[in-house]
Image (tube, helix red, strand yellow):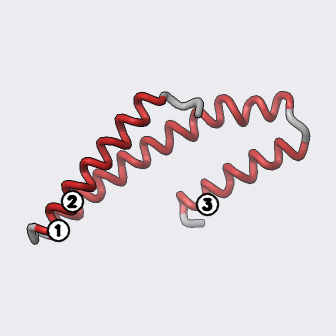
Amino acid sequence: MKADRDKTLRLLKTARGQLDGIVGMIEDDRYCVDISNQLLATIAILRKANAGILRAHLGHCVTESLRTGTETDRQKKIDELMGILEKTTGA
């Protein structure tokens, strides 16, 4: 992985901690809107981690494939990215 490993791990560990907190909120029968707000905050952290990973992938793996790969390699990288974009946008 070419992304900033420490930053990505920090984000993911924060999200994990938030998820543990959300589980506790549900177990404690906390207010629904408070739980929803915590879920949205966790989703935002996961999106940030994903963006960093994708940015690094574009900057290294895709760039290298476009520069030195075969047409098949280039198409594979494009298809991979399109698959991820479709998942993130619901297309």
Q: Which mark is residue 86?
A: 3
SS class, disc 3: helix
Left/right placement of residue 2 relative to residue 35 reads right
> What whole-number distance in Å separates the C-alpha atoms at marks 1 and 3?
31 Å
> Earlier along the polypeptide chain: callout 2 or callout 3?
2
Which residue is at 70% across, 51% downward? 80
Which residue bears the numbered disc 2?
A: 22
Q: Are marks 1 and 2 in contact (CB under 8 Å)?
A: yes
Q: Residues within 10 Å of mark 3 (few under 14, many from 20)?
A: few
Q: Are marks 1 and 3 in contact (CB under 8 Å)?
A: no
Residue type, numbered disc 2: Ile
Q: Residues within 10 Å of mark 2 (few under 14, many from 20)?
A: many
> What whole-number distance in Å separates the C-alpha atoms at marks 1 and 2?
6 Å
Which residue is at 42% across, 42% downward? 48
Which residue is at 23% across, 64% downward? 36
Q: Quadrant of the N terminus?
A: top right
Which residue bears the numbered disc 1?
A: 26
Q: Which mark is residue 54?
A: none
Residue type, numbered disc 1: Ile
Which residue is at 44% across, 41% downward? 49
Left/right placement of residue 20 relative to residue 72 reads left
* Image position of 71 with respect to 84: above or below: above
Residue type, numbered disc 3: Glu
* Image position of 76 with respect to 88: above or below: above
* Image position of 89 with respect to 73: above or below: below
* Image position of 6 with respect to 23: above or below: above
The x and y percentages for residue 76 are 79, 49
Q: Quadrant of residue 34?
A: bottom left
